Image (tube, rainbow, N blue to C red):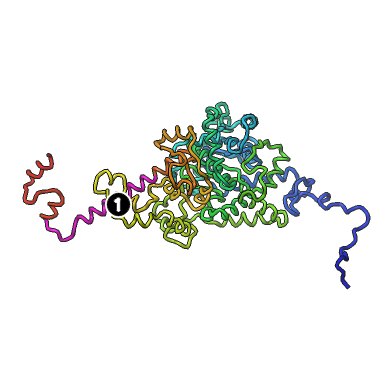
């Protein structure tokens, strides 16, 4: 009979273990060299074949999509990590004269110093910058070093989607290649082989103490690590976008790997950003208009990147992140990363399955925006708003319905007789009646929140109350903003304060609100003008409404108009 404590396993074989089969097998590509890397089960490559395999992936992604035209200026977003360092090395080798199929664009590198947001000391930040400059000088591309504190001096135009040129067809791409080759042949290879490294453009100056204090205050005011990571990614994107537009770059390359995009897809779903998955995880991201973000490393896994950097000594710079040393359940990003990597260890096709799913997503406009211009965009992520107040079945509809009782006026005030102040010119200009009808119109927090997508609204809830710093007050005064201090309103304790945000975000939100109010007022006046022209009115009555005296001659009327 079976017993509880009985062991049914087979006894261990006596003697030494048999030799591993990988020591005897050859490279799956050349069938001759000894394998040094095992990417997947049965895929063992020698050193040379692995390099050819790795480089071919990078070139194939760029060649298949054909978005980067010859001679185009491309900004490489380098963070110092393994993936972005590998991308930088691929571009460097692709532009060399020894390359079989040389890359034809003009690269530049940008490095964002995020030490203040991650809590680094000034000494550690200086050490990191010294290591980054050493790598950038070795590469030889034009480079730009910016600090994250510079977001407090960005203009509001960063948040506006500029018009971009129409995407060229396959024939246009071939014509651009032929024209570039002819120019390359005329000018000579010496002038086109590599961009001129004699004039690197570094940072104009270190950030001020006030900017560093404002950035630390901003991230300290965020309650959850999830919101901190989303806010850091948003500010980093805005800063890189500003650098690209300032220096004339039309493309930005990021080092997002296949594993990172799989984690990002699951994280975006959990954060309520399912409508933007095609933009967040696809090869190209055209949400900014004139600057397109491309991801050429999306076919490489983190395992392949680590092996390549190790075998070919690719330099990198370690920079601590916001979630460094954080526990697994500290944020949604860390939880999803641990979940995907744990599944990948047990089921090796997990990352590829999630990644292939993201490739099938299509960038389709929202209903009603396909024929005309796209609708309003989110103030932070700059995607088309995915909220719909008319559909109460959506998450945003339920959120809006739950906020309505908090914004309605008390019953006693509603029953009191009110006198419209719009009869006077001053009241009409201040939209006071509109504010009485909708109390949220006079609340700056409501104005900002109304211009955010669902995912960004959820993240903005994690901002706690806090007054503006002196640096933010000075920057806000330059943009025409007056930032309030905490405790100035009785409802400031009920809702999160948006005062720690950079001034350019609040200035753009105010400008959009004023533009929307002006358009609404123009529409109301047009409707009033249409109602004024009553059908069936006599010519004398119509002339009296238009300001002309009935029976007056044309000369008399012209004299009256002149007076």
Residue at left offset 57%, top offset 55%: 269
Which region is colored magenta?
Answer: 512-539
Instruction: From the viewer's side, name the closer residue of 158 and 117.
Output: 117
Quadrant for the C terminus, please: top left
Q: Is residue 234 visible?
A: yes
Is residue 232 or residue 177 the one in the foreground?
Answer: 232
Quadrant location of the N terminus in the rendered image: bottom right
Across and down, in percent, residue 107 comes to 56, 36
- Whether 550 is drawn above or below 176: the answer is below
Residue 307 in which image quadrant: top right
Residue pointed to by mark 1: 523
Instruction: Give 512 or 55, whichever is nearer the viewer.
Output: 512
Q: In the image, 366: left or right of 529?
A: right
Q: Judge left or right: residue 263 versus residue 276.
A: right
Occupied quadrant, residue 476: top left
x 73%, y 40%: residue: 311
Q: Position of residue 290 (x, y in %)?
A: 46, 42
Which residue is nearer to you in this view: 267 or 330?
A: 330
* Principal secondary structure, stretch drawn in magenta: helix
536 falls in the magenta region: yes
Which residue is at the far bottom? Answer: 1
At 65% across and 55% down in the image, what residue appears? 352
Q: Is residue 475 magenta?
A: no
Number of other residues with Cα within 10 Å of mark 1, as a class: few under 14, some 14 to 19, many 20 or more: few
């Amino acid at each position: 009979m079976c017993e509880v404590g009985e062991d049914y396993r087979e006894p261990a074989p006596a003697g030494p273990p048999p030799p591993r089969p990988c020591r005897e097998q050859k490279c799956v590509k050349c069938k001759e060299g000894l394998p040094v890397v095992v990417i997947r089960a049965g895929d063992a490559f020698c050193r040379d074949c692995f390099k050819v395999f790795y480089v071919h992936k990078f070139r194939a992604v760029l060649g298949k999509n054909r978005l980067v035209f010859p001679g185009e200026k491309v900004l490489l977003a380098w963070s110092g990590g393994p993936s972005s360092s590998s991308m930088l090395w691929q571009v460097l080798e692709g532009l060399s004269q020894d390359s079989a199929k040389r890359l034809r664009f003009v690269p530049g590198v940008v490095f964002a110093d995020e030490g203040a947001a991650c809590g680094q000391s000034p000494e550690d930040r200086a050490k990191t910058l010294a290591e980054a400059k050493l790598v950038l000088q070795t590469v030889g591309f034009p480079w730009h070093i910016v600090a994250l504190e510079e977001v407090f001096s960005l203009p509001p135009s960063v948040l506006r989607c500029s018009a971009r040129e129409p995407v060229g067809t396959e024939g246009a791409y071939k014509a651009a290649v032929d024209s570039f080759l002819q120019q390359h042949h005329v000018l000579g290879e010496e002038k086109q082989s590599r961009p001129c490294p004699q004039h690197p453009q570094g940072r104009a100056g270190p950030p001020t103490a006030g900017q560093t204090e404002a950035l630390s205050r901003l991230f300290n005011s965020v309650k959850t690590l999830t919101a901190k990571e989303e806010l850091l990614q948003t500010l980093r994107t805005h800063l890189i976008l500003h650098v690209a537009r300032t220096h004339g770059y039309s493309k930005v390359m990021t080092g997002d790997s296949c594993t990172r995009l799989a984690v990002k897809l699951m994280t975006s779903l959990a954060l309520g950003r399912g409508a933007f998955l095609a933009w967040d995880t696809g090869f190209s991201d055209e949400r900014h208009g004139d600057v397109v973000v491309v991801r050429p490393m999306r076919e490489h896994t983190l395992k392949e990147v680590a092996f390549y950097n190790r075998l070919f000594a690719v330099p990198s710079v370690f920079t601590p992140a916001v979630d460094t040393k954080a526990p697994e359940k500290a944020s949604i990003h860390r939880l999803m990363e641990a979940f995907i990597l744990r599944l990948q260890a047990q089921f090796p096709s997990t990352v590829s399955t999630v990644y292939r799913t993201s490739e099938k997503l299509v960038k389709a406009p929202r209903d009603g925006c396909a024929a005309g211009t796209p609708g309003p965009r989110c103030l932070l992520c700059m995607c088309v708003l995915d909220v719909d107040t008319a559909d109460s079945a959506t998450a945003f509809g339920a959120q809006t319905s739950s906020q309505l009782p908090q914004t309605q006026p008390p019953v006693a005030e509603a029953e009191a007789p009110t006198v419209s102040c719009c009869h006077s010119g001053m009241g009409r200009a201040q939209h006071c009646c509109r504010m009485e009808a909708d109390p949220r119109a006079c609340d700056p927090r409501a104005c900002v929140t109304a211009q955010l997508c669902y995912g960004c609204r959820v993240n903005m809830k994690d901002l706690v109350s806090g007054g503006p710093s002196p640096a933010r007050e000075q920057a806000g005064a330059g943009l025409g903003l007056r930032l309030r201090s905490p405790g100035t309103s009785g409802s400031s304790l009920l809702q999160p304060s948006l005062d720690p945000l950079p001034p350019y975000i609040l200035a753009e939100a105010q400008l959009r609100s004023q533009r929307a109010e002006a358009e609404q007022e123009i529409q109301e006046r047009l409707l009033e003008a249409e109602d004024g022209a009553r059908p069936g009115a006599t010519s004398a009555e119509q002339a009296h409404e238009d300001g002309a005296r009935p029976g007056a001659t044309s000369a008399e009327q012209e004299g009256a108009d002149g007076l």
